[in-house]
Every structure is written in structure tokens, then in C-alpha cells.
Image (tube, rainbow, N blue to C red):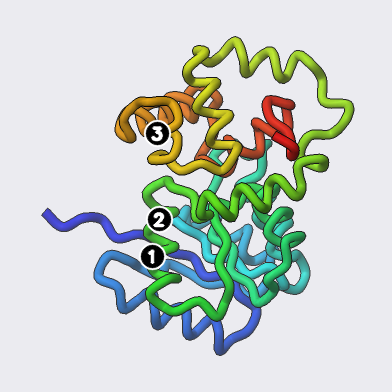
Amino acid sequence: MTETPIKVLICEDQELVRAGYITIFSAQPDMEVVGEAADGRAAVEAARRLCPDVIVMDIRMPILDGIEATRQLAGPNTAAPAKVLVVTTFNVDEYVYEALKAGASGFLLKDAPPAELVNGVRTIARGDSLLAPAVTRTLIGHFADRLRPADTPRPARDAVVRALTPRELEVLEQIAAGLSNAEIAAKLFITAETVKTYVSRILAKLQLRDRVQAVVLAYRVGLVSGSD
């Protein structure tokens, strides 16, 4: 039985770049480009109309930038968060931080090889985040103070603690520290498959889409800090 192709929406203001993406993704047997948009507002409208599996989003776009468009489509108050892969020419921590905070599932540079872009879409389509643990560790640690405001209410932390078992809390703390499943398994003396099961339970219990959101939440409620 043929699998349903991954529906991709391309949001990019430069026509040549947009055409390049369309060519790359349309050539994949497991992908279908269902639409394109040249500005952020059109991106939001197209995403809501077409319901793509993955949105490839540029940051710098007219009318509405890619970060705000991502926030509207995948932000914390979104009923059905979209899966957004942010692609930009700007290799700046600030942009990565803002994109992830807005709800993006991953981040790539425009000069990434086509194979990496294709793999990025597949990774996000299956529900994984596109940030290596080492990148997560550096990035989130750098912006920990902003992720965890000084006035974060204690009840927010308590709610997370109540929702998880002690072992799940341990795993969440290790995820937030930037450890991979294999590293967590070695540290807690359990199998990688068991870690994977714990991660799935944590995401389900806290209603989080992926590991990136889990990291952000852990910092935001004060389970971990940049100095941990």
C-alpha cells in the first residue's frame, strides 16, 4: 500500500528560492507541495486552508514576518499547532530562539544541502524536532533567563511536577540539559527504548508537540536553569 505523501507548504518571499524549494520537494516520491506563499499573511491563510503536514517558513518576509506567522500557526495558544521548519539565511541565535519560542519544530539555514532540507521535512513530519542535542544545550542555556522569567508562578512548576512521575521528571530534566536518548539511557542506567517511551509519555501528559517544547517548558517553569 502506498503511503500518503507529506504535504508541504512553501513560504518564501524570494521567487527563485521558492521555485528551488518546490523543485526539490516535488522531486521526492514521498512529498507533495500543496501550496506556496510570498508573505507571512498569505502563509497563515494558506496553512489554515490547506492543512499541510509541514510548513517551510522563511523568517524575513513582508507584511508579516516568519516568526509572527509561525506564532499564529504553532504558538502556545494554537488549537491545532502546525509543524513549522524555519529556514533562513541568518545564522543568529536570536532568530533561532525567537523561532523556537514561537512554536517552530526546527531550524535550518538556506545554504543547507538539498538532502538536508528534505531530511528536515521528513524529520518534522514524523513528529521529531530538528535540533541536535548539542545545539539545544547551547541555545536554550544561552537564553535560559528569558525562557524562565523571574516572575514565573510557582503553581506552573508544581503542575508539571504533579503531572509526571519522579522518573519522568528525571528524564525531562535530562532532555532540557540537551542529552540525547542514548546519553539519558547511560546516565539513568536504562535502555534507549525505555527513554523513548518516557519521552512519549512526557509529551503526552504535558500536551507538548516535541522535545523542543519540552526543553522550553522545563526552563520556563524553573525545573532547570542555565547554570545546571
| Mark 1 vs mark 2, CA separation in Å | 6 Å
| Mark 3 vs mark 1, CA separation in Å | 27 Å
Residue visible at 77% across and 69% down in the picture: 63
Would you say 222 lies left or right of 182 here? right
How many residues crowd around disc 1 within 10 Å: few (fewer than 14), some, or many (20 or more)? few
Residue 21 visible at all:
yes
The location of residue 161, given as percent across then percent down, is: 62, 14
Amino acid tagged 3: Ala
Identify the residue under disc 1: 119
Identify the residue under disc 2: 123
Would you say 95 lies left or right of 192 here? right
Look at the picture and state if 143 lies above or below 6. Answer: above
Mark nearer the N terminus (3 vs 1): 1
| Mark 2 vs mark 3, CA separation in Å | 24 Å
Q: Secondary structure under badge 1?
A: helix
Residue 72 visible at all:
no
Residue visible at 38% across and 30% down in the picture: 195
- Quadrant of res 11: bottom right
Identify the residue under disc 3: 186
Given the current orientation, which residue lies at the most extreme right position? Answer: 151
